[in-house]
Image (spheres, rainbow, N blue to C red):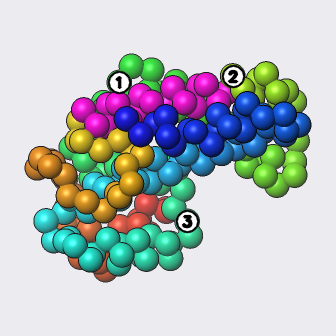
């Protein structure tokens, strides 16, 4: 699994003497969560039989031009295009863990904007949150690899699966223009 490599930076920061190590590692950990979900989403999109080598660049450009795609939008997108919802793949405690990740994201966003959180988080609390974030990412990676052969931390999300995946609503993203419209529909 690629999880260990992905979180290597977080470990380096946590093992440093930097005063801001907990908040820095916490913030980077949440970026890893968001990146993993985005990559699972793009991997699934690329499984459409209409997309082949070279289309990954075009799909990526369309995604990059849509500035309103966030964590929750990618979750909703996965749920709309894969025959199993993310909750089914993640397994037990999904709803609880999902709500925790969403609340951590709100706190991180406040911190990024120079605001205080109501919780007054200290170093130990932030480090505990990192372990919860890592549990989320490990669970996603393990279960998505088992389900579809891709856990979100692989190098290239624009690759075809070794096995045929069951997609639904494929008409929503069967062309580049429809993919663009599909992304916009996820923003509403």
The picture quadrant where one finds residue 143 is: top left
Residue 13 image offset from top left, x and y in percent? 72, 38
Rendered view: 111 above or below 15: below
Task: Label 2, secondary structure: give it.
Answer: helix
Residue 96 image offset from top left, x and y in percent? 52, 24
The reply to whether the C-beta atoms of the residues labelled 2 and 3 are less than 8 Å apart is: no
Q: Which residue is mark 1?
A: 91
148 with respect to 106 (left or right): left
Rounded to the nearest angstrom, the CA distance separating label 2 from label 3 is 30 Å
**Within 10 Å of the Cα at label 3, are there few (<14), some (14-19), or many (20+) other Cα atoms?**
some
Residue 39 image offset from top left, x and y in percent? 40, 54
Viewer can see residue 181: no
Q: Residue drawn 34% across and 57% down? A: 157
Task: Label 1, secondary structure: give it.
Answer: loop
Of residues 79 and 42, which is closer to you in this image?
42
Query: Is residue 182 within the magenta segment?
Result: no
Q: Which residue is mark 3?
A: 68
Between marks 2 and 3 in the image, the one whose residue lies nearer the viewer:
2
Query: Of the numbered discs in the image, which one, if any, rests on residue 7?
Result: none
What is the span of residues highlighted in magenta in the rendered image?
129-146
Query: Of the numbered discs in the image, which one, if any, rests on residue 128?
Result: 2
Residue 175 image offset from top left, x and y in percent? 23, 76
Q: Residue drawn 85% across and 27% down? A: 122
The picture quadrant where one finds residue 134 is: top right
Rendered view: 11 above or below 28: above
């Amino acid at each position: 699994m690629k999880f260990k490599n992905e979180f290597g930076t977080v470990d380096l920061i946590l093992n440093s003497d930097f005063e801001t190590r907990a908040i820095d590692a916490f913030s980077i950990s949440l970026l890893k969560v968001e990146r993993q979900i985005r990559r699972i989403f793009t991997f699934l999109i690329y499984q459409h039989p209409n997309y082949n080598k070279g289309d990954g660049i075009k799909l990526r450009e369309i995604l990059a031009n849509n500035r309103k795609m966030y964590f929750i939008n990618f979750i909703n997108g996965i749920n709309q295009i894969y025959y199993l919802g993310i909750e089914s793949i993640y397994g037990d405690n999904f709803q609880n863990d999902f709500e925790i990740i969403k609340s951590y994201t709100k706190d991180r966003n406040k911190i990024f904007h120079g605001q205080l959180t109501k919780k007054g988080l200290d170093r130990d609390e932030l480090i505990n949150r990192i372990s919860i974030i890592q549990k989320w990412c490990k669970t996603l990676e393990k279960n998505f690899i088992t389900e579809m052969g891709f856990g979100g931390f692989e190098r290239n999300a624009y690759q075809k699966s070794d096995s045929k995946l069951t997609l639904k609503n494929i008409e929503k993203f069967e062309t580049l223009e429809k993919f663009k419209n599909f992304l916009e529909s996820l923003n509403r």
